[in-house]
Every structure is written in structure tokens, then in C-alpha cells.
Image (cartoon, rainbow, N blue to C red):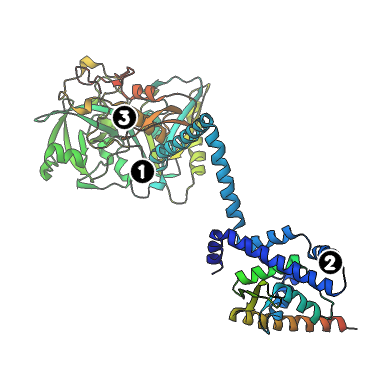
Amino acid sequence: MEKEGDLMQGTLDMLVLKALARGSKHGYGVAEWIHESSNDVLRVEEGALYPALHRLELRGLLAAEWGASENNRRAKYYSLTAAGRKKLAEEAEYWRRMAGAIASVMQMA
Amino acid sequence: MKLWAKVKALFKRKQLDRDLEDELVFHLTMREAKNRERGIESEESHYAARRQFGNVMRIKEACREAWSFVSLETTWRDLRYGARALAKNPGFTVVAVLAIGLGIGMNTGIFSVLNGVALKLLPVPRAEQIVSVDQIFHGKAQRNEHGEPGLFSYAEYKNYRANNHVFSGLLAYAPFLGGVPLEGENPKGLMGAETSCNFFDVLGERPSLGRTFVEADCRAPGGSPVVVLSDDLWRSQFGAESLIVGQSISLNRTKFVVIGVAAPGFRGLDPWPIEFWAPVTMQKALEPDSDLLLADTTGWLALQGRMRPGVSLEEVRADLGVIAGRIDQLHPGRTTTLAIHRASEGLRPAEGDCYPACNRGKPVADRPATANGEPADCVSWWVAGVAAGGLVARGHCAVCAGALADTRGFAALVEFQSRPARLGVFAGAHSINGNCVWTGAGVVCNAAGPEHRH
């Protein structure tokens, strides 16, 4: 179902995991956090975000819980599981190496 | 875990859908609120949120997909739709089910028969080396047939045996020899086979008692009245007496010396169990009405050869083809082609069933009476089928199209194309049994006096 090596999807998954690294958030919170953390550069499409959240939940990387939101509405809160935390570390490491590699290629005169 | 979560999700579909709806609505509400904060009008902010969100249905679909076995669920929907359509048209359903059932049944049946008849190798050592040889004549052919058109004369057999380079041994035997009267204390009609004297050696069969034939037994016509008994006959008729070797038994008023007993389980090359084997040179003693050894235009011997190691079927065809061509030169206007196949085992009737017991080409009146009411004196129609099956197996017959039946009464239509059409199953029964006629109710066979119907 998930295509390995799909940079965009893989990147989104990594960003979602990262967004939840400091604690649980609902979907909207995840989208906002990514948007703000990237200095408004990255805007996560909701059409991609929610399927990604559900997929990660199904793979056991995220746990979901219904709770009350800051404005007292019923909202679904996602948090990292142990597997999710491990996955995030892996993804981050992979990303660091890829970014470094691409950067050094691009810096070649 | 993923699989289990999906399975659980299957049963909580509605709950999942509601949750998804809530989740997305919450998102929209949050976005709307934020838009309002930025000073966008209430109604406008709603639509703006919607616009930013994209197609809600698409998102829902994508999320559901994550939770579902898409293909499984579609398949299940298709099945239900199919079942509904079939239920609506019961007539069509019945016809379709019957047609498919019949088709599957026929295929299974034909395969069972072919598997039993044509695919199973002979139960002899290194059976894969044994091939059957049949001949087919084209053009002008003066030919008397004894039993079946593909058989060889004795002279032809000797020619192929002496001049081939592909066999470590080539044997001949006369199929369809039945109802040979065994005289003595317990008279009985026997199924026998006249064989070349290398018969057991080529097959690699050792006797359990005494010896089998040696070449000297086949040296002169009528010269060596010796016989090898089957294990079954030895036990049933002679009480498994080991002193039987060296004693004489009377077959069709000729004394034969028993020289050996075949190994248990060896029942010859015919589809029915053979009870004794005699040298081919004793043909006239067993069948006083005909002298086939010198009848050069009469085909009566079936040939099977054991290929030398490393020889292929193609090489056998080429080598024997040369010999056939040489024989054809003596018969202007005639060409012979050979059908060469790996020899296979025919269907065998179960114990206690009846076997074809009519002698080939024998007028009934001339036959001495054998034991009355022997089951061996009749032919149940499935045995005819079995016989035809045997013919198919041996390649003796061309297109054998007929109902072949096994012991469970199952019948299948078999069409086995190896030659120009020649024998059907009923014609097959007819050719095995010179005196048998097809009556529609069964094959009436006339070996021993009054007719026995089966």
C-alpha cells in the first residue's frame, strides 16, 4: 500500500511523526505545526494529511485517542507510539544523510 | 497487527465512518475559526475553509482505503451481485450449473480413464524404457487381421527384432487369447498369452518358481510345449504346490510342461490378468484352427521393446522406420508407418469380475466345453470398455471412441486419436471376442456352449 522510496509520501510521514514528537496533537494541529515550523513554506494538504495519519495509525506508529479540544470540541488526538518514535529516528537519520548527500552534489563546482 | 486491525475495522465500519466525519468536521471548524480571526467574513470564511480543504469525499475515500481490504470487499460485492442475478433467472442458472458440472465431470472422467489407461507405466522394472510398436498401412495392403489391424506377423516381428539398433530386446505376444480350456480335475477356461521367448527377460520379470522361457523354447514350431503359470493361477488351481514345476498340465488337449511360476503381481501386458504364458511357437497347439506362424500377411502379434539406455523415442522411430521401409519394398504399392509410444498399463478389472473369455476366430461348436457358468465366460460391458481402454493404451486402435467404464460403473466418452478411425468400444469388444456380439444390453459372448449374458 505504501510505496517505498516515494519521497513525497515518505517526507510527509516523517513530518507528521516529527510534529507529534513533543506530544499529542489533532490533525488540524499537525497541519498548523508543520505550516508554522516551516515559516509558512510548507502547507500540508488535508487530502494527504488525513490518509497519512490513518495509515500511520494502522501501521502502529501512531496511537489515536478522542479527547476534548482547546475550544471544547470532540477531537481525535494522535501521539507517537514506541514504534513511531523509533521510525522517526530512522527517518530523521535517513533524511539527514540524503540532504547532506544532495547538498554536497549540488555544491560541486 | 495491521491485518487484525483491518479485520476489526470490517465490523466497525459505521463507527469508523462517524469518527472520520467528526475528525474532518473538526478540522473544518478549526480552519473556519482561524479564518475569522484573520478578519474574513463568517460565510466567506466557511467557504474559504472548504476551498482550502479540497474535496471532502475524496479525503474520506482515501482514509477508508487505508482501513479496508479494497479488493476483498469489491470481490464480495461482485459475488453478491452475481448471486442475485442468478437467483433472478433460475432457468439460466440450472442450465449453466448443469453445463459446467457436466463439463467438469467429463474432464475429470476422461482424465481418470486416460490416467489409468494411457499414462500409467507398466508395472515392470524401468518401465519408462518400454515402448509399444504398432503399424499402420497405407495404400495397397493385403492383410488378414487377427484381433486388431496394427499387429505384426511372426516374420515381421523377427525382422524388426533382428535388424533394429535401438532395443536391448524386442518382445512379441499375442493379445486376445482367451478361453483356453485347462483340462484335468478342475477344468477351467484360461486367459493366456503366446509370447516370444525373450518376453520375461525384456520385461525384467523373474519367476518366483522354476524358470521362464529360453530361446531354445522358441526354436521350432510346436517343439517346446512349456508353460509359465501366473501366481494367481498357481494358487487357485494348483494349491500353491511347489512341485508343480516339471509336471504336465493339459491345455486344449495338448500336454504342456510347467516350467515356472511368475512373480506375484505380474499379470502380463493385457488389460485383464493373464493366467499362463506359452511360447509363441506353440500357437497351433493352443489354437488348432489356425497356423499363424507361417501366415506372413496376418497381423496377430503385439510388439514391445526395451530401449537401450540413452536411446530416445525419436531414434526408435527413425531406426524402425528404416526396417519398415525395407519390408515395404517387398510389397509394391504399400507404405507402412509405425506408431511408437511409451507402453502403459491398461485398466484392470477388479478381482471377481468377469473377463472376456472368447477365443479369437474360433467357431463355437468346435470348442470343447469348459466349466459351466464360470464368470470368466462372460463379458460385462464395462470389460469391453476396459478392453477398448487397453487397446487405446497400447495404441492398437486408432480412434477409440466409446464409453469406457470403470468398476464403479462410471462411464466417460473417450476419444483418443492416434490413428485413422478404426475401432469403437463395441467393435473393440467384437474384435477381442470373435464370437461376441453387441446386443444393446451387453456383450453376449459364446465361448462355452450356451450363451452367458452379463
Q: Which mark is residue B122?
A: 1
Q: Amino acid at mark 2?
A: Ser
Question: How many residues crowd around disc 1 within 10 Å: few (fewer than 14), some, or many (20 or more)?
Answer: some
| Residue receiving disc 3 | B383
Residue A58 seen in the figure: yes
Query: Which of these two is toward me, B143 or A40?
Result: A40
| Residue receiving disc 2 | B42
Count the labels in the image: 3
If you read the primary sequence from the N terminus, does the residue marked by circle 3 or circle 1 appear first? 1
Q: What residue is shown at x 44% (from left), y 40% (from top)?
A: B164
Q: Are marks 2 and 1 on the same chain?
A: yes
Q: What residue is shown at x 58% (from left), y 50% (from top)?
A: B75
Q: Residue furthest right?
A: A109
If you read the primary sequence from the N terminus, does the residue marked by circle 2 or circle 3 appear first? 2
Q: Quadrant of the N terminus of chain B?
A: bottom right
Q: Amino acid at mark 3?
A: Val
- Camera-near label (2 vs 3) is 2
